[in-house]
Image: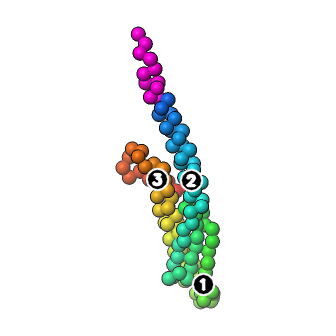
Amino acid sequence: MLKGLGGLGNMAKIMKQAQEMQGKIADAQAALENIEVTGESGAGMVTCTANAKGELKGLNIDSTLFNVDNKEVVEDLILAAIKDVQAKANEAMQAGMAEVTAGMKLPEGMNFPSM
């Protein structure tokens, strides 16, 4: 005896939901390119900007730092600003992806890798 589609109907529903989720994730990833974050160091003497995907877009160094004696300090400030903007980009990316996955039952502590 056949009882209709049974589990096949549920499978089709799951596949449709998966396709919708894939589309939402792709849209969210595209949106991350337009979210801009700024990192800084040295009380703002070095700033850099990036999108939420972590792609660096700009770097600004205060002209008062341009002195041969400050070379190592400037290098350290640049690295610190880049690390700051990368951390902020990762936070923005995680927040953006959290909106997409709201309501999904993901394992606790699961984060999306940086893109």
57 sits left or right of 83 in the view: right
76 sits left or right of 101 in the view: right
Residue, disc 3: 99
Tag 2: amino acid? Gln
Q: Position of residue 17 (x, y in %)?
A: 49, 38
Mark before the other along the chain sequence, 1 or 2: 2
Which residues lie in the magenta part?
1-11
Q: Position of residue 104 (x, y in %)?
A: 42, 45
Residue, disc 1: 62
- Callout 3 secondary element: helix
Tag 1: amino acid? Asp
Residue, disc 2: 29
Residue 54 visible in the current orientation: no
Name the residue located 57 percent from the left edge and 82 percent from the top edge: 74
Q: Which numbered disc, 2 or 3, marks the residue closer to the eye? A: 3
Tag 3: amino acid? Glu
- Callout 1 secondary element: loop
Q: CA distance from mark 1 to mark 2?
A: 33 Å
Q: Residues within 10 Å of mark 1 (few under 14, many from 20)?
A: few
Name the residue located 51 percent from the left edge and 35 percent from the top edge: 16
Q: Which numbered disc, 1 or 2, marks the residue closer to the eye? A: 2
Name the residue located 50 percent from the left edge and 82 percent from the top edge: 43
Mark before the other along the chain sequence, 1 or 3: 1
Q: Residues within 10 Å of mark 3 (few under 14, many from 20)?
A: few
3 falls in the magenta region: yes
Q: Which numbered disc, 1 or 3, marks the residue closer to the eye? A: 3
Q: CA distance from mark 2 to mark 3?
A: 12 Å
- Viewer-side residue, 71 vs 29: 29
